[in-house]
Image (cartoon, rainbow, N blue to C red):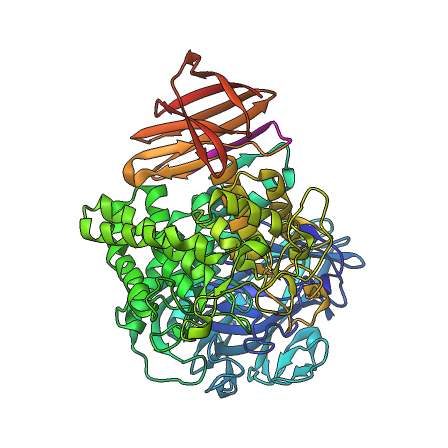
Amino acid sequence: MSETSRLEDRRSLVSGDRAYAMGDETGLYPATGWHIRGEMGGFWTAPLKLLDGVWFSADGSWLGKDIPATKYVRGQGYQRFEYRGKGLSADRVEYAPEGTRATVIGLTFRSDRSRDVRLALDAHSELMTAYPWGWTTPGAATNDPDTGSLSGGALVFRDKSGTAVVGSSAKPVAQALGSDHRGPQDPAVVCPSDGTAPARCDDSAFGKGTGGGLKYDLRLRAGRSTTIWFAVAGSDQSAKDARASYDQALRDPAAGLKQTVSARRAAASSTVVDLPGDRLLQQSVEWSKQNLLDSAQEATDVKIRDVDEGRAYPAALGTVPKMRWLAAGFPDYPWLFGTDGEYTAYAAIAAGQFNIVRDHLRALRDVSDLMNKRSGKVVHEVVSTGDVYYGSNTSAGNTDETAKFPSTVALVWRWTGDNRFRDEMYDFTVRNLRYITKNLDKDGDGWPEGLGNVERQGMGEEKLENTVYLIRGLNDLAEMARSKNDTATAKWASGTADSLQKRFEAQWWVPEAAGYAESIDDPADPANDNTPVLQRHWTGITPMEAGPIASPEHGKQALIQRERDCYNGEFGTYHTGTGPTSVAAGNPGPSCDTVVSAVGSERATFSLNTAVMAVAEGNFGRLGPQRRYTTGNARIQLDPTVWETPGAMPEIAPSPDFKANIDRPFYDRSMTLQAWGTYGILWPVVHQQLGVNPDLGNKTLAVIPQVPDGQRKISGQKIRLGAGSVDVTATHDGATYRTDVRSRSLSGTLVVGAVLPKGSKVTDVRLNGMPASYRLVTTTRGSEVRVTAPTTSARLEIRTQA
């Protein structure tokens, strides 16, 4: 995907699993990000920043300034900048090869005449770790000054945190060191560490880097291309490791680019969908797979310590040898989170990206057990340095991510049939839910206490999403326990879940608001014990999204209410809905000003909120309303009138209370790529529309598609399941519904079917052309026709009468 307008106002991003780089889309490097103000862009290899940037000039004319950038392109594993000057053009391609702690840059020049060109490279270092941050104790001001040297035709920068190496496989004809070397960004505009700052800065007050330059002679021939390759590599382990990464990156960079693109295409060859009635959503599925691949990160020898929300820096508790994870967001959250990764896992699993989900869960378990002494509590936020900002036993943490962990393990188990992974994680999942029920229910009513996804003034101690995910987690744990013949755990988990489910509606449903309370008032206050608090936060959707836990009747009412404009903007669901609005035609119900505890609205549309609403709609078979939300997330990712970085789904959409990122300073923006939004694209398409619902741990697969309203055909090819895959095509033509399924390398029971509209009467069901017996099952999605079929291929045809 490409962009040609306002390139200097847009963030660029290229990412591999061991390195990533961010600047603007002209190839320059404004001071970016806010965790360490102005320092979250540039070149990184987790957990270490290497450079503020690299700049190139031809005969003294800087690319991106004197020779303007005319186009920015993002592809599968690479980014490209196009520059067009008088008689001279240049293309700059960047990629981060998998498994190598380096970013590779290729510069290709074309001239309208034969000429000699003096090519210059400037590089400015900034060796600092991802933690500490600007406001923590200690803070980023403890960053050491860098030193520079020259070695083997390359620039080498060092401080106590690590080493960066910059150079080319070509031999320089001149080289220099100095304090600046920022290309056209000399002299630098420096942002203060906090407070008022210029609209655009080049560095921050935390910066203590140094610079260097290399020059090369190029002979250009008229009309022919000449390419020269560069690498930025580094390591927090040793200078030797940094140099090894540098050498590896430059060994055959052209082949490395082809290999990177080929690997991305191979990874994206799973879950290929054809959605004739929604091409935008089809394209979003493809780019969401790339967003997930961009998000894979890795760090080694990670020292784990509890920094107590930035107030302490004790000795490390121990070391995790390898931590591999799905980064939450770039540039300010490229590290390991509990709740973020647990939402993102559903998208990654639907995309067939099983291994990164397994690795993410292992990392959470390993860090949590070390940090929390095997209590079962899941940490919330782990910087790539190993510093646990939030989520130790002594901090509040987020209850929901501990509750969601068993469900995420069960998700992997169902889609892969991987009993070894289930067994590896099983003890931890049991401890997850024992921790919640033993330690986070002081009043003994069963509703868990602690923080959830939203913490706002006036909320009660017990949060809705924590309850919802606990019930789901208990049911998922019970299923895994039964598969292991752990009768005691299965009985406890299912019994506890049943007890909470039976009391759920009476406690959490607020009839006058046609919705679920987002919290229950402080149970320690006898006068207000278990009083529902409804404040219009997006978490009121979770009973319909997870499970679902909501009853069919109340779930539908709540979704209709949440579809109102007071809860939604142009691109999806607000964080917190607004007050009174008129009742829209066809959507009768309570006014949006019905609350139990007043709180201000927050009309910021997060891609996660919209994703959760999309999934909730699909769980109730509401694929017409669902399209508003899948389209919302797809547009902020793919619509040129909306995006900041082409193809990257951001954290927050342009909203009434959130000015678009492109119009904000680079040091005051939300994430340009946030992984969790893909949950609202891949899961609705694969699991709900195509109806792929595996339980390979129990050797069964159900494929019960639902063709969206107003559409006639949807299909998906190579949807990964365990060691095999399944192809699905679903059509709806008048009163006839067809489901075609072809499975590969699957054993067990296959059930095929379709979701029928309310009131449909089945008149004929045929499997592979022959009359077939069937079951008609009522679910929250609608009436599902289910037929047991051969495990290799099945064609089901259902004829109905209204």
455 lies above or below 722: below
710 lies above or below 680: above
Please report the residue visible at 49 percent of the width from the left and 78 percent of the height from the top: 128
**Where does the C terminus fall, quadrant-wise?**
top right
Q: Main secondary structure of the magenta part?
A: strand
Q: Nearer the viewer, residue 723 or 516?
A: 516
Q: Nearer the viewer, residue 689 or 200?
A: 689
Can residue 681 be seen here? no
Give the side of residue 607 with respect to residue 234, left or right: right
Write down the quadrant of residue 5 in the picture. bottom right
Q: Residue furthest front?
A: 527
Q: Which residues are magenta?
A: 710-719
- Residue 617 in picture, x, y percent from top left: 55, 44
- Residue 370 in picture, x, y percent from top left: 29, 71
Q: Nearer the viewer, residue 551 or 76?
A: 551
Give the side of residue 146 with respect to residue 79, left or right: left
Q: Is residue 592 magenta?
A: no
Q: Nearer the viewer, residue 799 or 267?
A: 799
Give the side of residue 79 with respect to residue 163, left or right: right
Q: Residue furthest top?
A: 770
Please report the residue visible at 54 percent of the width from the left and 75 percent of the height from the top: 35
- Residue 122 in picture, x, y percent from top left: 62, 73
Can residue 234 be seen here? yes
- Residue 698 in picture, x, y percent from top left: 28, 38
